[in-house]
Amino acid sequence: MKRVFSILAIAGLLFFSATPAVYAQDGTNTDQVADSTVVDSTQTKEVVPVEATSDEVKPEAEKTFHQVLKQKFIEGGPGFMGIVLLTLIFGLAIAIERIIYLNMATTNTKKLVQGVEDALNSGGVEAAKELCRNTKGPVASIFYQGLDRMDEGIDNVEKAVVGYGGVQMGLLEKNISWLSLFIALAPMLGFMGTVIGMIGAFDAIEAAGDISPSLVANGIKVALLTTVFGLIVAIILQIFYNYIISKIDGIVNSMEDASITLIDVLVRNKN
């Protein structure tokens, strides 16, 4: 599971990265011997080189996504680019942990309710509690807390189910606030790196005493790279965040529906 989501994260990072540039450089082979026509020494001693044909030009190989990404990351500077990378690592760690936890917390509530009802009819409350104890997930834990207070009346069972349901909801939403923090932090760090990079570019112009197009373009490019990577990190983490939230909503809805069904089952068995 961890490997799958790691691959998805890397694929998303590569997909939203800038379009790779194709670097080609025209050049001639240094080992090539140019044909020349030598004029007789009695007239003029002039060597006339033959023009290189297009077949002799060897362009550089295209750079891969990984190479371009690594190059742009290095060009952005180790300071803020490293911080943005840390936000991605921590955010993915939290997202993967939550996804694994939520997948383990997902249970077939209809099957569990039917099993509890059958256990109540065949073996009583203790058999139903044993079934819930051996079943993983928040719904089974809520059922166990309700069944444990069966002797105290239906009202106390309902209060226990509602109260413990809130506890389970808190466990489902654990560390989600940290994930939202990293989503907001990544583009903010990118913008800060851009501002600081622009200040450095203007300092370089001031020190040079002249506005050089290459100096200005290089400084602005390096400054904007932090923003690009910050936005990429935020997009990746936002996708995971929305998936986790939708997963939590589905589990909570199942918990509420199953809790109501449990109360109805207990009322029927008590009567």
Image (cartoon, helix red, strand yellow):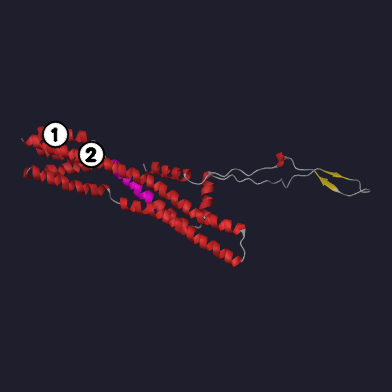
Query: Magenta stretch: residue 43 in it?
Result: no
Q: Residue at x 58, y 56 (%)?
A: 217
Contact between marks 2 and 1 (CB within 8 A): the answer is no
Farthest residue to the left: give it: 271
- Left or right: residue 146 compared with residue 223: left
User: Looking at this view, is 238 or 75 the one in front?
Assistant: 238
Is residue 148 among the parts visible in the rendering?
no
Stretch of the chain drawn in magenta: 90-103
Query: Magenta stretch: residue 93 in it?
Result: yes
Location of residue 21 in the rendering, given as x and y in whole percent from the top left corner? 57, 45
User: Looking at this view, is 137 or 168 the one in front?
Assistant: 168
Q: What residue sits right under mark 2 in the picture?
A: 254
Q: Residue at x 58, y 58 (%)?
A: 216
Is residue 233 among the parts visible in the rendering?
yes
Farthest residue to the right: give it: 42
Q: What residue sits right under mark 1 in the picture?
A: 117
Q: Earlier in the sequence, mark 2 or mark 1?
A: 1
Q: Amino acid at mark 1?
A: Glu
In the picture, the disc for residue 232 is: none
Location of residue 145 in the rendering, given as x and y in whole percent from the top left corner? 15, 45
Query: 10 Å neighbourhood of mark 1: few (<14), some, or many (≥20)?
Result: many
Query: 10 Å neighbourhood of mark 2: few (<14), some, or many (≥20)?
Result: some
When the figure is inspected, residue 52 is found, relative to residue 229, above or below; the finding is above
Q: Residue at x 48, y 55 (%)?
A: 226
Total count of labels: 2
Q: Residue at x 34, y 43 (%)?
A: 243
Mark 2 vs mark 1: give the one in front: 2
Location of residue 253 in the rendering, given as x and y in whole percent from the top left corner? 23, 40
- State the quadrant of the C terminus: top left
